[in-house]
Amino acid sequence: MSQRIHVMGIGKMGLPMAQHFRAAGHQVSVSDPSDERLQLARAQGLMVAQGAALTGALGEADRVFSSLPDDSALTAVAASVAALARRGTIYVDTSTVSQQASSAAATLLDGAGVQYVRATVSGNNKMAEAAQLTVMTSGPRAAHEAVLPLLKLMGPNQFYLGDAEQARLMKLVVNLMIAQTSAMLSEALALGRKGGLDWRDMWQVLSASAVASPILKAKAVQLSERDFTPTFTVHQMIKDLDLILGAGEATHTPLAQTALTHQLMHAAVAQGDGADDYAAIIKAVERSAGLSTDLE
């Protein structure tokens, strides 16, 4: 059955989400603070809602989805949904935010009679476009079951983790591993180069070895050619590491290696690589080892 869905935040992850919903036959409208993203959405045939139209879209929606950059954006969007959505509407947020901000949003939404599902995702924009994301969900089980057919349009791997903020924490656990993988690669590749190994040879061996994880294989295509075009920037990874270290502090969990990786990310920013892919910490370690970042 066709549903009325409004998507708030149509960046690299939110726009593919909206397109998958529309392709499945749902009535989809979108909103975003960026005029550039709204123009792109119009060019792709999506209905854009602004001003009074946005108020109407939120009031009429059966489901509201959002993909947002940070805690402050979630706080603002949750307030809008609480004020404008009908009681019984299900609001699904897919952002990487703190458990504290999400819990505060839950209280606000519950008071407005809006059901709140946290559906964090693992994967990059290319995986979002291919509907190959892993979705980690928490919140009221009945609301999760109601939106599960929509979540499956985003990717085949679906995990329900509990009735509160479990999905938020699980996303941080996953991203901790991703950040640490880039740190391990940085040191390993610098050691190999310093000892005379060929850059592409190392990537071929690593991709066929016992350490050939999905993330390493995914990165190998670009990085073997020294391509640091971002799927997720250094700046974005620093934001997530801030959340991860905050969660560690809140739970008294020592995250010493993660803290060092956080410092490497800041080194990459200081060296001018903040807008590159987070794997650009490879270049920061190379420089500290006295290596050139230009292989030619």
Image (cartoon, grey):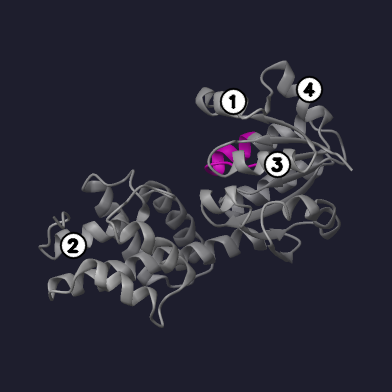
List the residue tagged with mark 3: 65
In the displayed structure, 207 sits above or below 112; it is below
Q: Amino acid at mark 3?
A: Phe
Q: CA distance from mark 2 to mark 4?
A: 53 Å
Q: Residue 286 — which label?
A: 2
Are the residues tagged 2 and 4 within 8 Å (C-beta)? Answer: no
In the displayed structure, 38 sits above or below 64; it is above
Most foreground residue, 94 or 283 = 283
Callout 2 crowding tier (Cα within 10 Å): few <14, some 14–19, many ≥20: many
Question: Quarter-wise, where is residue 267 in the image?
Answer: bottom left
Horizontally, residue 294 falls left or right of residue 71, namely left
List the residue tagged with mark 1: 43
- In primary-sequence order, the first of circles 3 and 4 is 4
In the displayed structure, 109 sits above or below 295; it is above
Magenta stretch bounds = 65-76
Q: Residue 126 — which label?
A: none
- In primary-sequence order, the first of circles 2 and 1 is 1
